[in-house]
Amino acid sequence: MLRSLQARLAAMLAVGLAVLSLFAATASFRVLREEINRMSDSALQETAQRLVPLAVMDILDRDQQSSAERIAGVRTHGELLTYIVRDQTGETILQSHDANPAVFPAALKPGFASTDTHRLYTETVLQGTVSLTIAEPLAARHRAGIEAALAVVRPLVLLVPLGLIGAWLIVRSGLRPIRRFCDGIAARGRDDLSPLGKAGLAIEIEPIADSVNDLMQRLNRALTAERSFTANSAHELRTPIAAALAQTQRLISEAQGTPIEKRARNVETSLRTLVRLSEKLMQLARAEGGRILADTPQDVRPVLQIVVEDIRRAERSNVLHLKLPEQAVLSRIDPDAFAILARNLIENAVRHGSDAQPIRVLLSDEGRLSVINRGSVVPADTLSRLNQPFERGVTTVEGSGLGLAIANAIAQAGGARLTLRSPASGMPDGFEASVENLRNGEF
């Protein structure tokens, strides 16, 4: 079953053209055959009427003979039309040199008659005492009909393929505005929900374009409201959480050595988790709705180096091994967005990697960022869900489940894809997160 509209229309036109051509050829052949029979009958009648007077004069000028006389030919040739002259008794008195008496039935009435092999015409003179019958082989008419049919079919053999090609080109040209419309949708960025242009679209396609534009407007409003709610909620939570954290820390200092101190420290831990969660939510809102690409490419090596050093100090970790290329890695990704992406990948490796095992942060000359840590292998079904918000593997480490989702959102916003592997490349275990196409303004 053809799923392409262009192929379906072209096939329908091709079948229609072929059927129409076959019908036209059949009708033309029947018309030509009837015309050939009519003209042949007319020629047969005209020839007989011209031969009758000549035959009568020849008979009257000759002495009566006991046998039929065969007209001698001027030169050797084959006769298409043969004739025979008979008297009132049916005796043959004159015939053409190629005439075969067996072809001519006896007692023929004036006019046309047909046998299995010949078309006959009989003409009488001298009050019916002399009759002339002229015969034409039906095979000659059949050959003429075949030649006429070939004369009709030969142009069709050339015209039908040209017609099919023309139908394909016409359909392709007619569907060009639809292809431009589809290409315009495909070429749009991930967050580009502006209305689509309808210039050049057929009237039948404009309602589809209007429906798509209406759908994108509604989707844009829904996404804007969702991102605004996430960002505003995270921002509004920061102040009361900070105030509650300050009050809790003061309570800890006042309650040292009492049973309340342990409970206050538990509250502090929960408040710090809320701080990290609100920060991650703000990062996710920016990744999903913010401006990810910069106007001009910039070198991402210094940004990555700053992020690694900051995590080393904050996590008190000496297991981070950074490897940067010697030449600049230019990318259009916004430096702040790249810092958020790299920080989330590295923090995920630090928190979920094996203790005291090295964590490798690699930036290649081709613009591929990889973060690799040791640890147990993550099951495939879990691995496929880790780039979704609030998805976490089997672990006892505290976390929000948003780090990889934020990195994935930033990568998708720039037209790239975050790839997760476990075990890591070339290792029996571990976890690897990589983002490609940072170089040359691509992301």
Image: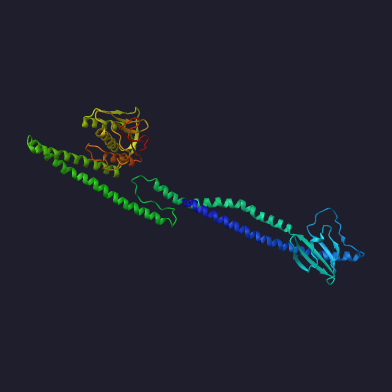
Q: Looking at the rendering, which quadrant does residue 259 occupy?
A: top left
Q: Which x, y percent locates residue 245? A: 14, 40
**Which residue is painted at 26% across and 49% down in the image?**
226
> Looking at the image, which is closer to me, 57 or 181?
57
Q: Which x, y percent locates residue 215? A: 34, 53
**Which residue is painted at 65% across and 55% down in the image?**
152
From the viewer's perspective, tell me whether residue 153 is left or right of residue 228.
right
Q: Which x, y percent locates residue 83? A: 81, 62
Q: Looking at the rendering, which quadrant does residue 104 occupy?
A: bottom right
From the viewer's perspective, tell me whether residue 345 is left or right of residue 161.
left
Q: Looking at the rendering, which quadrant does residue 348 occupy?
A: top left
From the viewer's perspective, tell me whether residue 35 is left or right of residue 279.
right
Question: Is 269 drawn above or below residue 225 in the view shown?
Answer: above
Q: In the rendered view, how is the structure colored?
A: rainbow
> Looking at the image, which is closer to me, 265 or 291?
265
Q: How many marks?
A: 0
Q: Quadrant of the C terminus?
A: top left
Q: Residue furthest bottom?
A: 127
